[in-house]
Amino acid sequence: MRKLTQYVKGFYMALGMFCGIPLPFHVWDEKLTTIMVASLPPVGALIGAIWWGAALLLTMPTLPIVMVAAILTVVPFWVAGFIHLDGYMDTSDALLSWRSLPKRLEILKDPNVGAFAVVMLAILFLLQFAAMFSVVSSGRYFILLITICVVSRSCSAFSILALRHMPISNYGALLGTGGNRMNKAAILFVGIVAIVLSVFYAGFIGLIVPLAVVAGYVFAMRKVYKVFNGVSGDLLGYSMVIGELTGLIALALLQGVEINLWF
Protein backbone atom coordinates (compact mmCIF):
# COMPACT_ATOMS: atom_id res chain seq x y z
CA MET A 1 0.00 0.00 0.00
CA ARG A 2 2.86 2.36 0.84
CA LYS A 3 4.53 1.62 -2.51
CA LEU A 4 1.29 2.31 -4.39
CA THR A 5 0.93 5.62 -2.57
CA GLN A 6 4.47 6.57 -3.60
CA TYR A 7 3.76 5.82 -7.26
CA VAL A 8 0.51 7.79 -7.20
CA LYS A 9 2.34 10.68 -5.57
CA GLY A 10 5.16 10.42 -8.11
CA PHE A 11 2.66 10.49 -10.98
CA TYR A 12 1.01 13.57 -9.51
CA MET A 13 4.42 15.23 -9.25
CA ALA A 14 5.06 14.37 -12.89
CA LEU A 15 1.76 15.98 -13.87
CA GLY A 16 2.79 19.16 -12.09
CA MET A 17 6.22 19.23 -13.75
CA PHE A 18 5.65 17.88 -17.27
CA CYS A 19 2.07 18.86 -18.01
CA GLY A 20 0.21 22.14 -18.30
CA ILE A 21 -3.09 20.85 -16.89
CA PRO A 22 -4.03 22.95 -13.82
CA LEU A 23 -3.82 21.00 -10.57
CA PRO A 24 -5.74 21.78 -7.35
CA PHE A 25 -2.54 21.63 -5.29
CA HIS A 26 1.16 20.89 -5.72
CA VAL A 27 3.15 18.06 -4.15
CA TRP A 28 6.91 17.65 -3.96
CA ASP A 29 9.02 14.93 -2.36
CA GLU A 30 12.75 14.73 -3.14
CA LYS A 31 12.72 10.99 -2.43
CA LEU A 32 10.22 10.33 -5.23
CA THR A 33 11.95 12.16 -8.09
CA THR A 34 12.97 8.90 -9.81
CA ILE A 35 9.38 7.67 -9.65
CA MET A 36 8.31 11.07 -11.01
CA VAL A 37 10.57 10.58 -14.03
CA ALA A 38 9.31 7.02 -14.50
CA SER A 39 5.77 8.46 -14.58
CA LEU A 40 6.51 10.42 -17.77
CA PRO A 41 5.01 7.74 -20.09
CA PRO A 42 1.66 7.69 -18.20
CA VAL A 43 1.64 11.49 -18.39
CA GLY A 44 2.22 11.08 -22.12
CA ALA A 45 -0.77 8.74 -22.25
CA LEU A 46 -2.93 11.44 -20.68
CA ILE A 47 -1.67 14.13 -23.07
CA GLY A 48 -2.09 11.77 -26.01
CA ALA A 49 -5.62 10.88 -24.90
CA ILE A 50 -6.55 14.58 -24.86
CA TRP A 51 -4.97 14.96 -28.31
CA TRP A 52 -6.91 11.92 -29.56
CA GLY A 53 -10.17 13.15 -27.98
CA ALA A 54 -9.71 16.57 -29.56
CA ALA A 55 -9.19 14.91 -32.95
CA LEU A 56 -12.39 12.89 -32.60
CA LEU A 57 -14.35 15.90 -31.37
CA LEU A 58 -13.15 18.34 -34.02
CA THR A 59 -13.64 15.98 -36.95
CA MET A 60 -17.27 15.22 -36.07
CA PRO A 61 -18.78 18.60 -37.04
CA THR A 62 -18.31 20.08 -40.50
CA LEU A 63 -15.36 22.27 -39.60
CA PRO A 64 -12.82 23.20 -42.28
CA ILE A 65 -10.04 20.58 -42.37
CA VAL A 66 -7.38 23.29 -42.42
CA MET A 67 -8.72 24.77 -39.19
CA VAL A 68 -8.97 21.34 -37.53
CA ALA A 69 -5.41 20.49 -38.53
CA ALA A 70 -4.14 23.84 -37.22
CA ILE A 71 -5.82 23.34 -33.83
CA LEU A 72 -4.59 19.76 -33.52
CA THR A 73 -1.07 20.91 -34.38
CA VAL A 74 -1.06 23.11 -31.28
CA VAL A 75 -2.97 20.82 -28.87
CA PRO A 76 -0.10 18.54 -27.68
CA PHE A 77 2.21 21.50 -27.04
CA TRP A 78 -0.52 23.44 -25.24
CA VAL A 79 -1.54 20.51 -23.00
CA ALA A 80 2.13 19.95 -22.11
CA GLY A 81 2.46 23.60 -21.12
CA PHE A 82 4.88 24.28 -24.02
CA ILE A 83 7.70 23.04 -21.77
CA HIS A 84 9.22 20.73 -24.39
CA LEU A 85 8.84 23.33 -27.12
CA ASP A 86 10.91 25.71 -25.02
CA GLY A 87 13.69 23.10 -24.88
CA TYR A 88 13.44 22.57 -28.62
CA MET A 89 13.93 26.27 -29.29
CA ASP A 90 16.79 26.74 -26.82
CA THR A 91 18.62 23.69 -28.16
CA SER A 92 18.10 24.78 -31.78
CA ASP A 93 19.70 28.12 -30.99
CA ALA A 94 22.72 26.56 -29.31
CA LEU A 95 23.14 23.65 -31.72
CA LEU A 96 22.99 25.70 -34.91
CA SER A 97 25.29 28.43 -33.63
CA TRP A 98 28.30 26.24 -34.51
CA ARG A 99 30.27 27.76 -31.63
CA SER A 100 32.56 26.18 -29.06
CA LEU A 101 31.00 24.11 -26.28
CA PRO A 102 31.27 26.87 -23.61
CA LYS A 103 29.58 29.34 -25.96
CA ARG A 104 26.88 26.82 -26.86
CA LEU A 105 26.18 26.22 -23.18
CA GLU A 106 25.92 29.96 -22.68
CA ILE A 107 23.41 30.20 -25.54
CA LEU A 108 21.49 27.21 -24.15
CA LYS A 109 20.99 29.01 -20.83
CA ASP A 110 20.20 32.38 -22.45
CA PRO A 111 16.47 33.22 -21.96
CA ASN A 112 16.44 35.36 -25.11
CA VAL A 113 15.12 33.87 -28.34
CA GLY A 114 17.60 33.76 -31.22
CA ALA A 115 17.11 33.64 -34.98
CA PHE A 116 17.78 29.89 -35.22
CA ALA A 117 15.06 29.17 -32.67
CA VAL A 118 12.53 31.17 -34.69
CA VAL A 119 13.49 29.49 -37.96
CA MET A 120 13.41 25.98 -36.46
CA LEU A 121 10.08 26.69 -34.77
CA ALA A 122 8.61 27.75 -38.12
CA ILE A 123 9.94 24.57 -39.76
CA LEU A 124 8.55 22.45 -36.92
CA PHE A 125 5.05 23.89 -37.13
CA LEU A 126 5.06 23.74 -40.93
CA LEU A 127 5.91 20.04 -40.94
CA GLN A 128 3.64 19.29 -37.97
CA PHE A 129 0.71 21.04 -39.65
CA ALA A 130 1.30 19.29 -42.99
CA ALA A 131 1.44 15.88 -41.30
CA MET A 132 -1.60 16.65 -39.15
CA PHE A 133 -3.54 17.83 -42.20
CA SER A 134 -2.84 14.50 -43.93
CA VAL A 135 -3.90 12.53 -40.86
CA VAL A 136 -7.11 14.54 -40.46
CA SER A 137 -7.88 14.21 -44.17
CA SER A 138 -7.70 10.42 -43.98
CA GLY A 139 -9.67 10.36 -40.72
CA ARG A 140 -8.06 7.11 -39.55
CA TYR A 141 -5.85 5.84 -36.73
CA PHE A 142 -6.27 8.91 -34.52
CA ILE A 143 -5.67 6.69 -31.51
CA LEU A 144 -2.02 6.33 -32.56
CA LEU A 145 -1.60 9.90 -31.34
CA ILE A 146 -1.63 8.40 -27.85
CA THR A 147 1.09 5.95 -28.82
CA ILE A 148 3.26 8.76 -30.18
CA CYS A 149 3.09 10.65 -26.88
CA VAL A 150 3.70 7.56 -24.73
CA VAL A 151 6.67 6.28 -26.74
CA SER A 152 8.35 9.69 -27.01
CA ARG A 153 8.13 10.16 -23.24
CA SER A 154 9.32 6.61 -22.62
CA CYS A 155 12.44 7.48 -24.60
CA SER A 156 12.83 10.73 -22.68
CA ALA A 157 12.33 9.15 -19.25
CA PHE A 158 14.79 6.36 -20.00
CA SER A 159 17.35 8.91 -21.19
CA ILE A 160 17.04 10.83 -17.94
CA LEU A 161 17.75 7.71 -15.88
CA ALA A 162 20.33 6.07 -18.14
CA LEU A 163 22.46 8.80 -19.72
CA ARG A 164 25.11 11.12 -18.32
CA HIS A 165 23.82 14.52 -17.25
CA MET A 166 25.35 17.86 -18.14
CA PRO A 167 26.55 20.00 -15.19
CA ILE A 168 23.77 22.51 -15.89
CA SER A 169 21.06 19.82 -15.88
CA ASN A 170 18.51 20.01 -13.07
CA TYR A 171 17.82 16.30 -13.40
CA GLY A 172 21.35 15.39 -12.35
CA ALA A 173 20.90 17.16 -9.03
CA LEU A 174 17.42 15.72 -8.53
CA LEU A 175 18.30 12.10 -9.27
CA GLY A 176 21.75 11.91 -7.72
CA THR A 177 23.26 8.64 -8.90
CA GLY A 178 20.35 7.88 -11.21
CA GLY A 179 17.29 5.66 -11.26
CA ASN A 180 17.06 2.04 -10.21
CA ARG A 181 16.49 -0.91 -12.49
CA MET A 182 12.86 -1.30 -11.54
CA ASN A 183 11.96 2.18 -12.75
CA LYS A 184 13.93 1.72 -15.97
CA ALA A 185 12.17 -1.59 -16.55
CA ALA A 186 8.79 0.04 -15.88
CA ILE A 187 9.52 2.73 -18.48
CA LEU A 188 10.47 0.15 -21.09
CA PHE A 189 7.45 -1.98 -20.20
CA VAL A 190 4.98 0.88 -20.72
CA GLY A 191 6.60 1.81 -24.03
CA ILE A 192 6.55 -1.78 -25.30
CA VAL A 193 2.92 -2.27 -24.22
CA ALA A 194 1.96 0.89 -26.12
CA ILE A 195 3.65 -0.46 -29.26
CA VAL A 196 2.03 -3.91 -28.92
CA LEU A 197 -1.43 -2.41 -28.49
CA SER A 198 -0.83 -0.20 -31.52
CA VAL A 199 0.11 -3.23 -33.62
CA PHE A 200 -3.07 -5.04 -32.56
CA TYR A 201 -5.11 -1.98 -33.50
CA ALA A 202 -3.44 -0.79 -36.71
CA GLY A 203 -1.24 -3.64 -37.95
CA PHE A 204 2.01 -2.62 -39.66
CA ILE A 205 1.13 1.08 -39.32
CA GLY A 206 0.81 0.56 -35.58
CA LEU A 207 4.37 -0.83 -35.57
CA ILE A 208 6.07 1.60 -37.94
CA VAL A 209 4.72 4.79 -36.32
CA PRO A 210 6.14 4.18 -32.80
CA LEU A 211 9.37 2.86 -34.31
CA ALA A 212 9.60 6.12 -36.25
CA VAL A 213 9.19 8.00 -32.97
CA VAL A 214 12.06 6.01 -31.45
CA ALA A 215 14.22 6.51 -34.56
CA GLY A 216 13.61 10.27 -34.60
CA TYR A 217 14.28 10.55 -30.89
CA VAL A 218 17.49 8.49 -31.02
CA PHE A 219 18.76 10.44 -34.04
CA ALA A 220 18.18 13.78 -32.30
CA MET A 221 19.47 12.64 -28.90
CA ARG A 222 22.60 11.09 -30.39
CA LYS A 223 23.42 14.38 -32.08
CA VAL A 224 22.92 16.64 -29.06
CA TYR A 225 24.43 14.15 -26.60
CA LYS A 226 27.62 14.09 -28.63
CA VAL A 227 27.75 17.87 -29.06
CA PHE A 228 26.94 18.81 -25.44
CA ASN A 229 28.58 15.82 -23.70
CA GLY A 230 25.47 14.88 -21.75
CA VAL A 231 21.75 15.52 -21.43
CA SER A 232 19.66 18.29 -19.90
CA GLY A 233 15.99 19.20 -19.83
CA ASP A 234 16.32 21.32 -22.97
CA LEU A 235 18.04 18.55 -24.93
CA LEU A 236 15.42 16.04 -23.81
CA GLY A 237 12.65 18.37 -24.95
CA TYR A 238 14.39 18.90 -28.28
CA SER A 239 14.73 15.16 -28.91
CA MET A 240 11.18 14.43 -27.80
CA VAL A 241 9.67 17.05 -30.10
CA ILE A 242 11.61 15.67 -33.07
CA GLY A 243 10.63 12.11 -32.17
CA GLU A 244 6.94 13.01 -32.05
CA LEU A 245 7.19 14.92 -35.33
CA THR A 246 8.85 11.91 -36.98
CA GLY A 247 6.07 9.64 -35.73
CA LEU A 248 3.36 11.99 -36.97
CA ILE A 249 4.99 12.27 -40.40
CA ALA A 250 5.25 8.48 -40.58
CA LEU A 251 1.55 8.19 -39.72
CA ALA A 252 0.65 10.69 -42.46
CA LEU A 253 2.84 9.00 -45.10
CA LEU A 254 1.72 5.47 -44.26
CA GLN A 255 -1.95 6.40 -44.43
CA GLY A 256 -1.36 7.95 -47.84
CA VAL A 257 0.43 4.82 -49.08
CA GLU A 258 -2.31 2.59 -47.72
CA ILE A 259 -5.05 4.64 -49.38
CA ASN A 260 -3.19 4.62 -52.72
CA LEU A 261 -2.75 0.88 -52.57
CA TRP A 262 -6.41 0.39 -51.67
CA PHE A 263 -7.62 2.26 -54.72
Image (spheres, rainbow, N blue to C red):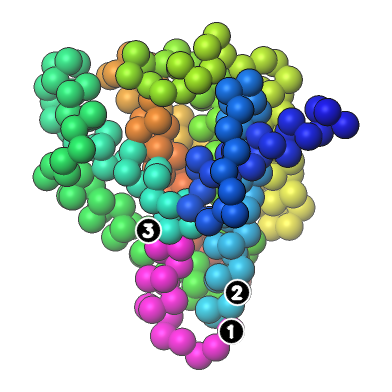
Q: Between marks 2 and 3, how big is the CA–CA gap? A: 18 Å
Instruction: Report how far apart the C-alphas of labels 1 and 3 lie in the structure.
Output: 21 Å
Residues at marks 1 and 3 touching, judged by CB atoms closer than 8 Å: no
Tell me the quarter of the image containing the C terminus: bottom right
Going by the picture, which residue comes out furthest to the right?
1
Q: Which residue corresponds to the image point at 33% horizontal and 38% vertical from the top-left?
A: 87
| Magenta-colored span | 60-76
The percent position of residue 147, horizontal first and vertical second, equals 62, 50
Cα distance between the residues tagged 2 and 1: 6 Å
Label 1 SS:
loop
SS for callout 3: helix
Disc on res. 56:
2
Where, by quadrant of the figure, is residue 2 drawn?
A: top right
The residue to which callout 3 is attached is 128
The residue singled out by tag 1 in the image is 60
Q: Amino acid at mark 2?
A: Leu
65 on left or right of 27: left
